[in-house]
Amino acid sequence: MRAGWLGIFLMLCQCAGAIHSEEMPVAHFIADYVRFYRITQVCILEEEDRLPWVTQVFQLLAASGGCYTARAKEGVNVAENRLRNATLSGSRRTCGSQALRVQTFLSRVDQRLFREAFIGAETRERWLLLSNSQFMAHLSPLYLPLNSKVTITNFSTDGKFANIWEAYQVSQHLKQRVTPVGSWRDCSRRRNIPFGERNTDVNGLTSDKKPSSSVPATSFSIPADVEVRRKSMTFGVLEGPVDDPFLRRQDLTGLHLTCTTITFPPLIVPKENGDGSVTIHGILAKYFDTMKEVMNFTYTCYHVKDKQFGAFVDGKWTGMVKEVMEGTADIAVANLAITQQRSTAIQYLTGMISAGFRIVLKRPSNEDYMWTVYTKQFDPGVWGSMVLVVTAAALCLYLVSRRSLQQQNASLSDSAFIVVGFVFGQGSPLSFQNVAERTVVLTVLFLQVVTLAFYTSNLVSALTVGPSLPPYKDLQDIDQEASLTFGFLKGSSNANDFRDSKTPLYQKIWRSTKDEDLVTSYTEGMERVFSERYALMIWEVFYSLNYGQDCRAFVLPVSYFPIYTSFGLAKESPLVPIMNKVVLDIRSAGLMRKWWLELSVDKSDCNALATAPIELKTVLTPFLLLLLSLVVSLSVLAVERTCHWRARRP
C-alpha cells in the first residue's frame, strides 16, 4: 500500500455535502472539537488510504457553516516495506500559524511522519493527534517541549468514547509527562465505523492491534488544577480544558539551570563559593529563589566573565547577553534592561523593576573653596566694581581736602587709607568740617553698610549650609561644561541608547566619549564622582538604594532612558511562558513590595539646616592671611630699621 503526505487544499465555505450513511467517529469528534474551541482553520496531515474520513470531517464542518482550510505537502513516502530517507518538501511550515494540525497517530509510520513535521516553529503550534489506547508506546520516544501544545485523543474500539490527553517534557533528559484533561462521548445514532481498524501490517511495519475492550471516558481522573468545561455538541458531549496549559506546567521536576549574574547591590549580591560558583543574595535573588521553590528547579550561578550586562560592540555581543546566547548560561539573573536590540538576541521575562537614569555629581562643600571661601560671595565683576568705587572715592576725598577752606591737605595715601578704613568699618583721625568732605565720607560709609550686609549674609549662609548647587539642569548643561567628564556604565544599555539615538546631542556625546570615561561598576563611578570633576549617568534605583542618603552627591532633576528590567533567557526558550506566570504571581502577591520595605534604606534631607563645627580647612585662608600680614609688617619694620640705621651712619 502506498502512503504519504497527500497535498490537499479544501476550501468549503457554507457548502453542503452529502454525509455518508456510515460515518467514522473520528469525524464526529473533530467536528465537535473544532466547534467547542471555535477553531476557524484546520490542517489535516494524512495518508491516502484515510482520505474518506478527511472528506467527512470537512463535509461535517461545512454543513454547519464556516470556512475551513486543509493544507499538506508530500515528502515522506512509505514503499516497498521500508522507510525512505525523505523529508518534507518545500517549506516545513505547511499550515497557517492559527490552524489546528490534525494527524492520526496509530503506528511507527505515523510517529515518523509526526517527527518530520514537528520541528522549528511547528513545535509551538496547536496539534491534535488521533490514536487509540496504544499511543503511549509511540509517543514516549518523541521530545515534546515545555511550550508545546500537543493534544492526544485515544478512542475506544467501538468509537463511542475518547479520552483527551496533554503531553510535554520539561527537557529532553527528563521524563515525558502525559496528563488527562478531558473526554468525549458520541451520542449520535448513526452506524459508526471504528477508528484505526487495521489488523494487517503497513509496508512491513506492524500496526497497532485493536484493544480487547472499550475504554470509557470516565475511566481516568482529570487533575484538579485543570479547568474543564462540559458542553453538549452536535454529535456528543465534550469535556475539555479551557485554561492556559502553560499555567499548569510550573513543576519543572528538578530541572537544573545554569545562571549568569553580576554584582549589583542590593539587588544582586554574589558571594564566592570554593568551586568558582557564587551564591546570590539580594532582592532579585529572593525573586529567583521564590521561583525555584514554586517551579521545583535547581540552579548554579556564576559571575559573568567580562563583568558586563551586555552590549553590541563591533558586531559582537558582550556580557550576560553573550553567555545566554551561546548557551553558557540558561538564564541571566540580574536587573537586565529590556531594550529592542537585546530582544533580538535573547528573550525576557515580564518586567520586574522600572526606572530611568539620572546624572549624579559631587555636591559642593566649603572644602572645595578653601582658597576662595571668603571671596566667592561676590563674583569678579562685583569685586572689580568695588575696587573702582573705592579708588574713585579716595581720589575725590583727596581733591576735596586739597580745595577745602579748612585746608586739611590730606595726602593721596592718607585719603586712600581713610576710604579703605571706612569700607572695613574703621574711623578716621581727621576731622571733616565742610559739606563736600562730609558728603564723600557719607558716600563711602553707605557703600560700607551695603557691602557688609550682602557679604556677611552670604558668608554666614555659606558657612552654615555650604555652597549653593551648581546651575546645571540637564545633560546639555553637562556637555557644555568643559571642566566636567561625563561617563556611564561600560557594557550597559546606555551604550546602545547613545549610539543608536538620532538626537544630535546624544550623537555628539557618543562620539566624544572615550573608553577611559566609562566605568566597570557604579561603585567605581561614584568614587570618581567624589574625587574628580566627573558626572556619572546612573540607574535611579541603584543610586536611591546605595547613595540616596549620602549628602556628598546630588542628582540632576531630568530622568533619561526609562527602562524595565528583568531576567533574560535564550530565544524561544520553553521556560519563558511558564516563568512569566510565576513572575506575575509574585508581583500580585505583593512580595516585591515586602522585599523593598525590608531594605529599610535611610533617607537624608541634604537640604535641611544642620549646625556643625567649622573645620580648620574652612578658616585656614584668613589665618594664613593674618599670618602673612604679620610677616609683611615685621618685614617692613626690618626694612625701616635698616634704612634708618644706614641713614645715621657717618
Image: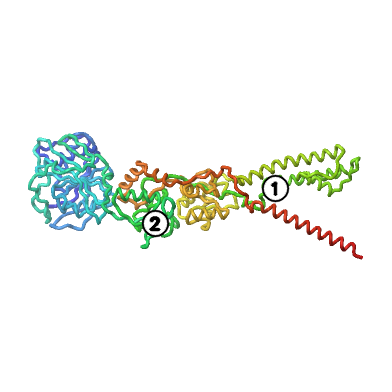
Q: Amino acid at mark 1?
A: Pro
Numbered label attached to residue 322: 2
Task: Say which of 56 and 455 sits in front.
Answer: 455
Residue displayed at 22% across by 52% down:
176
Direction right: furthest residue: 650
Residue 89, image x, y percentages: 24, 53
Q: Residues within 10 Å of mark 1 (few under 14, many from 20)?
A: few
Residue 142, image x, y percentages: 21, 53
SS for tag 1? helix
Numbered label attached to residue 380: 1
Residue 289, image x, y percentages: 34, 50
SS for tag 2? helix
Marked residue nearer the N-terminal end (1 or 2): 2
Q: Is residue 301 visible?
A: yes
Q: Nearer the viewer, mark 1 or mark 2?
A: 1
Numbered label attached to residue 33: none
Residue displayed at 50% across by 52% down:
488
Residue displayed at 28% across by 44% down:
247
Direction front: furthest residue: 613
Q: Amino acid at mark 2?
A: Lys
The mark tally for this picture is: 2
Classify the position of the C terminus by image quarter: bottom right
Task: Say which of 636 and 172 sits in front.
Answer: 636
Q: Is residue 69 visible?
A: no
Left or right of 129 on screen, residue 643: right
Direction bottom: furthest residue: 650
Left or right of 146 on screen, residue 24: left
Q: Residues within 10 Å of mark 2 (few under 14, many from 20)?
A: many
Residue 295, image x, y percentages: 29, 49
Q: Between marks 1 and 2, how big is the CA–CA gap?
A: 55 Å
